[in-house]
Image (cartoon, grey):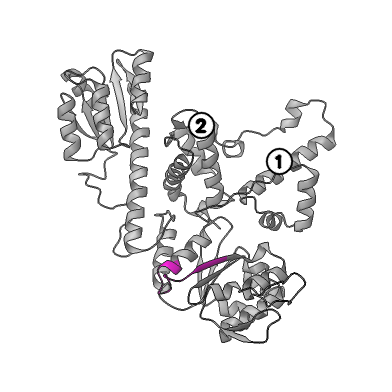
Amino acid sequence: MPELAVGHMATGREDLSSPGSVLIVDDEAAIRESLQALLEFEGYAVEVANDGLEGLARIAERPFDLVLLDFALPERNGIEVLHDIRERDSDLPVIMITAYGTVENAVNAMQAGATNFIQKPWNNEKLLADVRTAVGRRRAEEEVIQLKRALKQRYNFEHIIGKSDPMLRIFDLVAQVAPSRSTVLLQGESGTGKELIAKAIHMNSTRRDRAFVPVNTGSMPADLLESTLFGHVKGAFTSAIASKKGLFEVADRGTLFLDEIGTMNLETQAKILRVLQDRKFMHLGGVTEIQVDVRIIAATNVNLQQQVKDGKFRDDLFYRLNVITIDLPPLRQRKNDIPMLVAYFIAKFAEENERLPLRTTPEAMRPLLEYDWPGNVRELENVIERAVVLATGPNLTVDLLPDNLIGRGSKFAIMEQRPDASLFEIIEDCERRIISDMLEKCGWNQTEAADRFRIPLSTLNQKIKRLNIEIKKKNRENGNS
C-alpha cells in the first residue's frame, strides 16, 4: 500500500523491533534488578520505578505494553496505583507481584482490573510466559486500532481487518477502481468478505452519498428476484396488489451489489445485461421504460468462466461484469491476519455481550493459526463468538475451541453415549453433525450449504427436517459474504 506502511505505523514507542516495553514498579531494589535483568535478557525494553507515583509519572511520559506492579508499595499500595492506571489506560496489561499470595489479594487485584497475579518467589519460565501473553495481546490490539485508524484516514474500509500482502494489494486495487464508473466482479470463497469490499468500493466512490443496495440473488426464486430488482405494477401477478419500486430504482445514482450472481437464471441474466447496456428497464407488467444510473458490483463464489462453458451463464453478461475483477484470498492464504482478526472479533463480541475482552493464550492461538478455515473469516468469527459466550474466565483457552480445530472428536458422540446404538443411528448422528457443522460454517445459509454439499436445496431441507436440525438465524453487521 503506497504511502502507508501498515503494521509498522508509529505508536510512540522507542523500539518497535523489541518484543515489547515493560515498566517494573517495586520498592525493593533487588526485585527490580532481578526482573529487569530477566526481561532485558529476553529482549524487552525495561524501565523501573521505585514507587507508585514514579510509576504513574513514567506511564504519563510514554506508552508501555505491560506493567509489573508490586502489591505492597509505600504510601499508595498496588491496588490504589492500579486504580490510577486504569483511569489513564483501561486496557494496559498489569501483572500484580506480591509476597503475600493470599486468595483475598488475588481476588482484590483481579477485581481492580489486574491482568494476572504472580507470587514471589516466582518461576522464571511461568513469569516470562505470562509476560509474552500480555504483551502479545496488547500489541495485537494496538495494531488493530492503528490499522483501522490508518485505513479510515486513507479509505472508508469499515470492519475490514488485514495487513497481509494479499489484503494490502486489494486495498490498493479498491482505491484505484472506486472512483471509476466501471462494473466490478468480486471473486472468492464464501466468507471472504466480498460484501465488505463492495461497500468499501462504494464508500470511496463519487456515489458514497447515495444508496448502497445489497441483494443476495442466490436466496430468492427467479420470479421474486425479478420483482425485487425491477419492481412491478399493480396486477402484474396474482399477489401484486400495489405497484412497487425495484432495487434498481432504489439504487439510482448509487451502487447495486449483486451477491451470488452465478446462481441467477438465464432469463434474469438477460434483463440484467440490458440494464448494463442501455441503463433502462421496465417494471414487471409495465410498458414504460425507466432510466437509471446504477453502478453494478457483482460477487460470486463459483467459477463464472466454467459456468459460461457449461451453458449456465451468459457469456455476454460475463464480459460485461468482468471489466475489473478482484480476487479475494481465502483466510488460509493470509494467516498473518488471524491474530488481528481474533482481537477484533473478541472486542466486538465482548462489547455485544457486555463482557471484558478475553486474552488469547498461546496454546489457543496455535490451532487458530494452523487450521485451514474452509469457512474463511465467517467461520473464524463464529468460533470467536462461541468462545466469548462460553468463557468463564479472563482467557480464551484451547478448551473453548471447537473439536475440529484441536483434533478432538474423532469418535462419534453417540457411540460413547449409547454403546448399543445401531449402525443406522450412528450414521444418522454422523450426518446430523456434518450438516450442522456445514450450516454453521455457512452462517446458517441453507442455499450456500447445499451448494457446497453439491446437492439440491430441497434435498438438504428434507435432511434438516428429518434430522431435527435447528436452524439459527443471525444478521451480521460486518457482512462477511
Q: Which residue does the numbered mark 1 point to in the structure image?
A: 433
Region of the chain picked out in magenta, as a range? 201-214
Residue 120 or residue 106, whichever sits in front? 106
Q: Is residue 212 magenta?
A: yes
Residue 432 or residue 74, whichever sits in front? 74
Where residue 212 appears, as percent x and y from the top left, is 50, 68
The quadrant holding residue 386 is: top right
Where residue 297 appears, as percent x and y from the top left, is 53, 71
Residue at horizontal 85 percent and vertical 32 percent from the top: 422
Q: Is residue 139 magenta?
A: no
Q: Which residue does the numbered mark 2 point to in the structure image?
A: 391
Where residue 130 appears, as percent x and y from the top left, is 36, 28
Q: Indicate the quadrant containing the N terminus: top left, top right, bottom left or bottom right.
A: bottom left
Q: Is residue 359 left or right of residue 280?
A: left
- The mark found on residue 226 in the picture is none
Please indicate, yes or no, whether residue 423 appears anywhere in the rendered image. yes
Residue 2 or residue 391, whichever sits in front? 391
Where residue 71 appears, as percent x and y from the top left, is 26, 19
- Does dot 1 land on a helix, a strand or a loop? helix
Q: Indicate the quadrant containing the C terminus: top left, top right, bottom left or bottom right.
A: bottom right
The quadrant holding residue 273 is: bottom right
Instruction: Say above or below: 111 vs 164.
Output: above
Amino acid at the residue labelled 2: Ala
Q: Please tell me how many numbered marks the rendered image carries.
A: 2
Residue at horizontal 23 percent and vertical 26 percent from the top: 81
- Does dot 2 land on a helix, a strand or a loop? loop
Residue at horizontal 53 percent and vertical 67 percent from the top: 213
Q: Earlier in the sequence, mark 1 or mark 2?
A: 2
